[in-house]
Image (cartoon, helix red, strand yellow):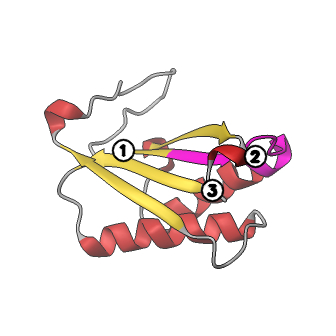
Amino acid sequence: MPLFTVTMRTGRLVKEKDAISAALHDASVSAGYPEDDHFLRFICLEKADFRVSPRYPDLKEPRSKRVLMVEVLLSAGTEQHRKRSLLSAIVTRLQAAGTDPNDVMVFFGEIDRASSS
């Protein structure tokens, strides 16, 4: 059940969003989630509404304007090894889709199954 929310600056083309969506879905499937479990939303913000520290925490190269904040909402109790597997797959597949790993930020959250449909 991962629910992906991708926050980024406005201006991305539909084909770029399609590539990001496919990369996240492929990552999810590789981590053991079902093929038909695909839920994703994009939040696109203007420069003034999307502020990211360029080098935190101690990055050698600054992030670009193409930063993706990927929030992954999972069922409570998801095992750490599954999160690590999913994280690795997300970064790898987004890189293959054209996103610099330096521009990928991933945040996991958990929700009790009784609190979702």
Q: Is residue 110 visible?
A: yes
Q: Between marks 2 and 3, how big is the CA–CA gap?
A: 14 Å
10 Å neighbourhood of mark 2: few (<14), some, or many (≥20)?
few
SS class, disc 1: loop
What is the number of the mark on residue 84?
2
Name the element at disc 2: helix
Residue type beneath disc 2: Arg
Q: Which residue is mark 3?
A: 2
Residue 77 among those drawn in magenta: yes
Work out which quarter of the rendered image holds the C terminus and state it: bottom right
The question of residue 16 being in magenta is answered with no
Which label is found at residue 67? Answer: 1
Tell me which residue sits at (35%, 56%) in the image. 42
Instruction: Please provide percent x and percent y for residue 89.
Output: 66, 59
Q: Earlier in the sequence, mark 2 or mark 1?
A: 1
Give the residues in magenta: 71-83
Q: Residue at x 52, y 64 (%)?
A: 39
Circle nearer the N terminus (2, 3):
3
Residue in view at x 66 percent, y 49 percent:
87
- Crowd tier of the residue under label 3, counting other residues whose Cα lies within 10 Å: few below 14, some 14–19, many 20 or above: many
Residue 35, quarter of picture? bottom right
